[in-house]
Amino acid sequence: MSDQRATTSWLVRLLARVRDWAIGQPVLLITLLVIVLGVWAFAELADEVIEGETVTFDEWVTLKLRTADAPAEPIGPPWVERVAMDITALGGYTVLTLLVLAVAGYLLLARKRHAMWLVLLASGTGWALTMGLKEIFGRERPSIVPHLVQEQSLSFPSGHAMMSAVVYMTLGVLLAQLVERWTLRIYSLLLAVAATFLIGLSRVFLGVHYPTDVLAGWSAGLTWAVLCWLVARSLQRRGVLEKPQE
């Protein structure tokens, strides 16, 4: 009986400490929840894709974006296809590489070397993770409709969706860490989210990815970006990463 009471008392004290920590660190708690949800979402999608449970949904959405009697023609006026191609280019490896190098160069010139290395490492490891996941799952690209752009790599997860989340979200959260005004922080994050969202949609519209490829890419990319934000936050608190500027 005494052992039971001791165990119960220990659990109560532990829960009280967890409660106090959560109250004192709400942002960190929310961040950890986002990471857990991101990992869970990716794992669930991957499991469903492996078991073939998403085929019906994926094909239904893909076909809904094409003209019924002409699968090679996307729905909507001709300019929509051109816009989709322009948007999807923003998530291509060439554009993302140039963007990362441009930002890294700016941070170097601004003498923010730690922030520069954070951007380079986050983007580089994100790219390696994307390629590794593609090889692990080995899913072929959609064949139910003609592709409106040429692609050679595997399909799951979407590299454009994942890398746009990694790069744009990492840059967004890093910028939010380097500025003081909350309006600028929100603005930078909203731009990152909008770019990532539109790039992912363009991949499905162009027929080169299934919807679940994009959802998995968003989940993995967002998780990686949030992890990078945690690193940036920790480094900033230790005085390694540069403090916000007005």
Image: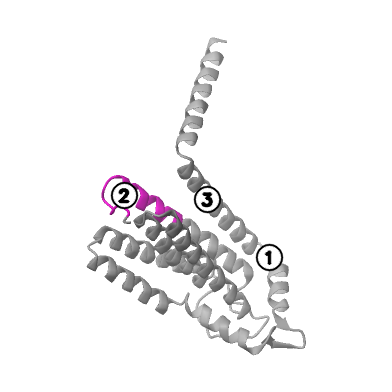
**In this view, 28 is above or below 154:** above
Q: Quadrant of residue 102?
A: bottom left
- Give how far across and how far down residue 157 sits, in percent: 54, 67
Contact check, label 3 and label 2, Cβ < 8 Å:
no
Q: Which mark is residue 54?
A: 1
Query: Can residue 235 be found in the magenta stretch?
Result: yes
Left or right: residue 142 compared with residue 239: right
Q: Nearer the viewer, residue 27 or 132?
A: 27
Question: Which residue is at a point 55% across and 14% down the rendered structure image?
Answer: 5
Q: Which one is in front in this view, the residue at disc 3 or the one at disc 2?
A: 2
Q: Is residue 170 magenta?
A: no
By secondary structure, the bulk of the magenta-drawn segment is best described as helix
Q: Amino acid at mark 2?
A: Gln
* Closest to the observer, 186 or 57: 186
Whole-number angstrom distance, CA of label 3 to CA of label 2: 21 Å
> Which mark is drawn over residue 101?
none
Q: Is residue 144 left or right of residue 112?
A: right
Label 3, secondary structure: give it: helix
